[in-house]
Image: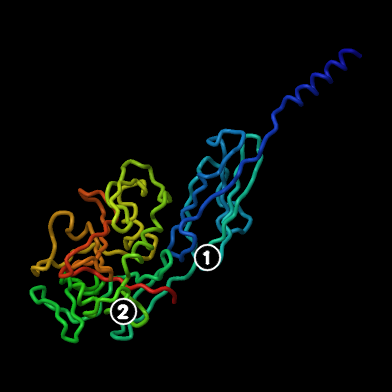
Amino acid sequence: MKIRITGLLLLLLAISCEPDNSAPIAQFICNPPNGNVKTLFDLDATSTNDPDGLKYLLLYRWDYNGDGQWDTPFGPFQISTYRFQNPGAYKIRLEVKDTYDAITSSMVTVLVDSLHHITDPRDGQVYPITKIGSFWWMGRNLNIGKPVDTSVDQSNNGVIEKYTYPASDSLNLNGGLYTWAEMMGYGYAEKSQGICPPGWHIPSDAEWNNLMSVFRTEAVHFTPTYQIWGEKFIPDQQVTHNNYLTEGAVWKLLLETGSTGFDAVPLGYRNPDGLFGDQDYHFPGNTATWWSSTLSGDYAIRVRLYKLDTRQGDVIRFADNRRFAFSVRCVKESI
């Protein structure tokens, strides 16, 4: 009898000594929060926590479209990416499990749009458009205008003129190159229509900033083998940063092979002296440059997207000579 009682006491003691387990706190962010059928959504669960355990022992699994079927098994990976094939509203669900098999979940709803296009009523050209940040952007460089030779200065003659580079661009995929004055229709008002189609306007420095702010988070997840040094895309601030976690990350997302729909084209530009830029880090294939409608003294703000170069910056904004001819994108608040 004493043996049985002692055994029972030991069992109760062992049970009472087991630690109380708190379930993990599952949470994640989806970047961007909404997109279209070309968007690659980045799912980041690194903010998940385990109040009384080791975070690196947590396991994660994902249901991307909220259909109740798990698209991944439990695993140690906190980061996932997914592209939706069809437009709609989707509930992305995350489950997190700790070493005691306690499970919690978190869910985020994303809106996935179809791809859109507009037709410029002035010449019938069709442009894809995509929403990034708060605005709708043309997914191709503007291409309106009469081609003129690079030796001829664009002028206020009532005719929209463009430079074409390279001349072999028979499909007009690169768009035209325009001086700031030609682009603005020889006006000076920020966010004016300029040479954009009706209802669209030349993006301001602030609107370019809004687009780039989508990438100013640690949501581009690659092995951080490089640090990026350069100018962060904030007006009039010079800072060092490593926000993009890998060299050329934003370039890859905005490029025509990327997932944003922006479809940046690596291209040169025309110098004020009438020559196309083809030297240093400006040569075609490594950069893409667009005007903004924002003046800076006697200059205007332009935006340059870099691939890999000696300055090691994904995006650099700069006040430049308005006689340069750069590419143009148009923007709109809503469609």
What is the number of the mark on residue 334? Answer: none
Residue nearest the viewer, comparing 158 with 73: 158
Q: Is residue 96 above or below residue 232?
A: above
Q: Which is nearer the N-term, disc 2 or disc 1?
A: 1
Q: Which residue is mark 2?
A: 193
Task: For marks 2 and 1, give the CA distance.
Answer: 29 Å
The C terminus sits in image quarter: bottom left
Q: Tell me residue 60's x, y (percent).
A: 56, 44
- At x 65%, y 35%, the residue is 100
Packing grade of label 2 (10 A; few <14, some 14-19, many >=20) is many
- Which residue is situated farthest in the front direction here? 297
Classify mark 1: residues with Cα within 10 Å, few (<14), some (14-19) or many (20+): few
Q: Nearer the viewer, residue 281 or 272?
A: 272
Q: Pointer 1: what residue? A: 111
> What residue is drawn where x is 87% and y is 17%?
5
Q: Secondary structure at mark 2?
A: loop
Name the outermost residue toward the top: 2
| Image quadrant where one finds the N terminus | top right
Tell me where residue 232 appears, x and y as whole percent: 31, 53
Coordinates of residue 73 in the picture (x, y in percent): 57, 45
Q: How is the image coloured?
A: rainbow
- Left or right side of 194 for 148: left
Which mark is nearer the camera, 2 or 1?
2
In the image, what residue occupies the spot 19% across and 60% down?
Answer: 284
SS at mark 1 in the image: strand
Q: Amino acid at mark 1?
A: Leu
Q: Is residue 49 above or below residue 269?
A: above
- Quick check: 195 left or right of 38? left
Q: Amino acid at mark 2?
A: Gln
